[in-house]
Structure formats: C-alpha cells, structure tokens
Image (cartoon, helix red, strand yellow):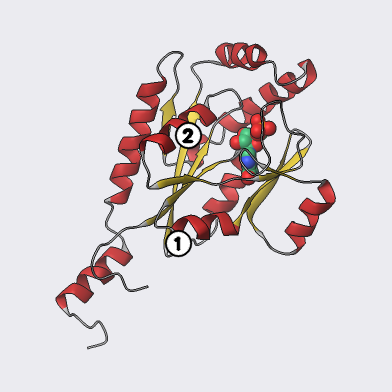
Amino acid sequence: MAKTDLYKPELVIVISGPSGSGKSTVIDALCKADERLRESVSVTTRKPRRNEVDGVDYHFRSKSEFEKQVAQGSFLEWAEYGGNFYGTLKSEISVAHEAGKDVILEIEVKGALQIRAQDLSPSRGLFIFIVPPSITILEKRLRRRKTESESEVNKRLAIARSEILEIAHYDYWVSNQEKLLQEAVQQIQTIIAAERSRIDTQLIETVNQLLGIDKSD
Ligand code: 5GP
C-alpha cells in the first residue's frame, strides 16, 4: 500500500493479563483518551454477565455458531478459557485499520501466542502483559466483583498462575497496582507512542517514494 503523504503504522495491540488484573478498565481508559484506538469486540460462547450487551462487550454466540465461524476461517485466533470459547474476528482488525485506527485486543495468552506466530504485515503486533500486584490481591479482586462462582474463581486463579509464566512471549509488562490505574494507562500510552514511531520496512518504503528512489534501479 503506497502511503506517500503521512506514514502511519497499523498496529494490532494485544493486551493480556490474568482475570482480575484490570485489563478491561485500563483498555476503556486508553480508548477514551485516544481516538486512534479501537477495541475489538470478541466472539464468545460464555453467557453474558449482568450489564453486558451483545455486540458491545462481546458477540455472544452458541457453541455451534462459534464452531461454524471457526470452520469458515473467520477468526484471527481463538481459544478455550474456563470451559468457554473466545475468538477475535479478522474483520474486527480490518474494519479498525480501514478507519485509520489501531486495534486493541483484550485476549488470554493462548490466543495471543497464536497471533505472535503469524505474519500480520502490513500490520504490526505489539504485545503487552498486565501484571497484578500479587496473587492475593488478584484473588481479592476476583471475589469482590462477584461475577463468578467460587469454583470459577478458583479455576481463574489456577489459569492466572499458568498465564504469568508465559510473560516471556510479550514485548512489555505493566503493573496495575491498586489505586494506580492512571499510572498503568500512562505507561501503556507511552509504549504505544513509541511503537507508532518505530522505523519499519513500510516507513522506509514511504521515505523512498517521497525521495523518488526506485529500488529496482
Ligand atoms: P471474561 O470471561 O472474563 O470476559 O474473559 C476471560 C478471558 O478470555 C480473559 O482473559 C479475556 O481477556 C479472554 N478473551 C476475551 N476475548 C478473547 C478473544 O477473542 N480471544 C482470546 N483468546 N481470549 C479472549
């Protein structure tokens, strides 16, 4: 794609972190503050929680509908988490990029690793892991929000431990301390700003076009 006037990378910003680490709150704040960010709405077979709206929080689908979309190749990635399926639609990425926005995905680790393994060009992946202050605080947050049953909370805590072990596959980590949400948000804004200024092959192509340099000469 020729972009001779204004160069702008197309980012796929992946944010993971254990359930209860505060990902959703951080992402909401990021999107509110930056109109160049658009959050992808995932498909899930999980039942909606109170206050969750179909098409806004998730596209809530049955297992057979989800499987149909898997067979159609609609997903960039998908994974099973706590007995339910979750997936990112390829169309969520293209719609955001066509609107000139970077897309932000709040997904668990297995899905993030599937994206890590793909060539997204001309887009670029940016992988950020949100770390809770401690497992004890994580546990408190999960119980406090009362959206899961006792056995589901325990399942999520077990998954949290295994997810934290995968941090090596991410580019950056951010700590979401109690009462320091704004600090976590600012740190991620700084990371995104740096990534937008990274020199990549597309930028070099744009510079060459501006200078009238034909690489085939
Ligand atoms: P929850 O049930 O709390 O909304 O989400 C459970 C986990 O699934 C969270 O870690 C969340 O980030 C993750 N998740 C949400 N959407 C997707 C998705 O599209 N793909 C994958 N792989 N994980 C997702």
Element type at mark 1: helix
Quadrant for the C terminus in the image = bottom left
Along the line of sight, which residue is nearer the eye, 44 or 20?
A: 44
Along the line of sight, which residue is nearer the eye, 44 or 59?
A: 59
**Comparing marks 1 and 2, which lies closer to the viewer?**
1
Residue 137: horizontal and vertical position, in percent?
Answer: 56, 12
Q: Any atom of ligand 1 within 8 Å of the CB at mark 1?
A: no
Horizontal placement of 20 versus 176: left or right?
right
Quarter holding ligand 1? top right
Dot 1: within a 10 Å radius of its alpha carbon, few (fewer than 14), some, or many (20 or more) residues? few
Residue labelled with disc 1: 98
Q: Dividing the picture into quarters, in which one does residue 109 lie?
A: top right
Dot 2: within a 10 Å radius of its alpha carbon, few (fewer than 14), some, or many (20 or more) residues? many
Residue labelled with disc 2: 27
Name the amino acid, label 1: Glu
Q: Residue 11 shows which numbered tag?
A: none
